[in-house]
Amino acid sequence: MNFGEGIVRQNQVNPFDDFGTPMEIISLFGGKKQYLQAITELEQEIYAA
């Protein structure tokens, strides 16, 4: 499984598709690297609770 591809596919479901295409969403974070960092930080906060 391609990790990046899995993330993009996750964003093709509601409500994520309301924010735009997967590439538009990634660009909102400043690129793939920043997007993945934001996801990592979110996961850490969720599992720290």
Image (spheres, grey):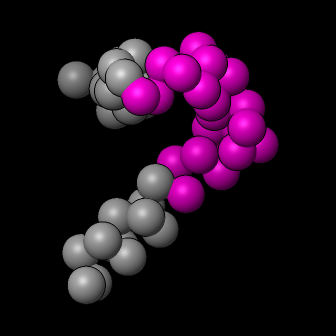
Number of numbered callouts drawn: 0
What percent of the width, then of the height, locates residue 42? 43, 64
Where 29 sits versus 10, above or below? below
Does the magenta stretch mainly form a helix, a strand or a loop? helix
Say which quarter of the image contains residue 15. top left
Q: Quadrant of the N terminus?
A: top left
| Above or below: residue 18 compared with residue 38 | above
Which one is nearer the viewer's eye here, 17 or 40?
17
Give how far across and how far down residue 40 sits, in percent: 43, 61
Residue 12 in which image quadrant: top left
Q: Is residue 14 visible?
A: yes
Please say whether residue 2 is one of the residues in the magenta stretch. no
Rendered residue at 34%/64% (across/down): 43
Q: Position of residue 29 (x, y in %)?
A: 70, 45
Q: Quadrant of the C terminus?
A: bottom left
Residue segment shown in magenta: 15-38
